[in-house]
Structure formats: structure tokens, C-alpha cells
Image (spheres, rainbow, N blue to C red):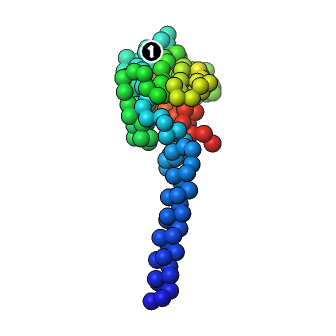
Amino acid sequence: MMFTTFQSKLSIALCLLFVLISQSSCHVYSFTGASIDPNVKTISIKYFSNQAAKINPVLSQQFTEALKDKFTRETSLQLIEKNGDLELSGAITDYSILAIGRQGNQAAANQLSISVKVDFINNKKENDQWSTIFTKSATYESSQSLAAVEGELVTQINKLLVDEIFNKAVVNW
């Protein structure tokens, strides 16, 4: 019985110590690895227009919504229309298919590639801004038509792009 009481008190003490240490930190951490200054409360994510030569008519909307969803789900930031503490804007700059590998006279596989130019501004921290082009791709068998796999591939690539943008913006490892 005494041992159990000691364990309970130790557990409570360790929990309090953890809370005190985490509260004295300069940033707010989440389980996603995001490290956000406690003064940063809002984020604005503008619509990413499709400026690629080849157009997927739903890509801009899907990408923009996936980016908004990632930040609202995995941070405590409030999404506002404009002038957020953090701002993300940009455009889809490339949407292309490349034949890769050879099987006789034809390609063994094709690769769908998407590039997005992202501009980031932290309005709460001077000199915390960047502009980067992110590119991700996915491969599919040449025996499949793009129309048959495009939706799934775009979803996969969007996730990869959004994760990389999120990490660059708010994960400071």
C-alpha cells in the first residue's frame, strides 16, 4: 500500500515537472513536431492557382484544401482569409508525365510529377520568410491509363507536398 502511494506521488510530481518545463519553453510544441511561437495565432492560406502548362481542373482546389486541412488539424492556428500571422501563397507550376524505364520499344512506367511554388511569410518574426519550389512525383505502370490512376496519384502527391511544406513552415528540427 505504501509503495503504491509513493508511486502515485511520484507520478504526480513528474507530471507537474513536465507541465512546468513545457510551459517555460519559447515555443508551443505539438505531437506532429510543429514548433510555433506562442504569439502566432492565425494562418492565411491563399488559393494556389494552376499555372502549369498541363491543367488538372481540380488540382488547385484539392491542393489548397489539403494544405488548409493539414494546418488546422495539426496545429492550434486559426485559419483566416488574409493577413494571418503566418501566410502561405503560391501556385502550381508544373504538372507533367514522364515515361521512365524501357521494355522493348515502350516505357515500362510513367511518372506523374507536380511542382508547387510556395511563398511563406511569418508576420510575427522579422526575416522569417522564404520562397521555395516543392516537387513530388508518383509512378504508375505504362499499361494503365492516366485517367484510371490520376485521382489516386494526385492525392498521394498532394499529401507528400503538403507534408513537406508543413515541415518547412512550422517544424524546426
Look at the picture and state if 164 lies above or below 82. Answer: below
Along the line of sight, the residue nearer the viewer: 111 or 94: 94
- Residue 140 position, x and y percent, is 51, 31
Along the line of sight, the residue nearer the viewer: 121 or 40: 40
In which quadrant is the N terminus drawn?
Answer: bottom left
Q: Which residue is mark 1?
A: 50
Along the line of sight, the residue nearer the viewer: 73 or 161: 73
Which amino acid does the dot numbered 1 rest on? Asn
- Residue 129 position, x and y percent, is 58, 24
Residue at the (50%, 79%) spot, across then down: 7
Look at the picture and state if 123 lies above or below 38. Answer: above
In which quadrant is the C terminus drawn?
Answer: top right
- Residue 36 position, x and y percent, is 52, 39
- Residue 170 position, x and y percent, is 54, 36
Q: Residues within 10 Å of mark 1 (few under 14, many from 20)?
A: many
Q: Is residue 118 left or right of residue 55?
A: right
Decide if residue 136 is in sight here: no
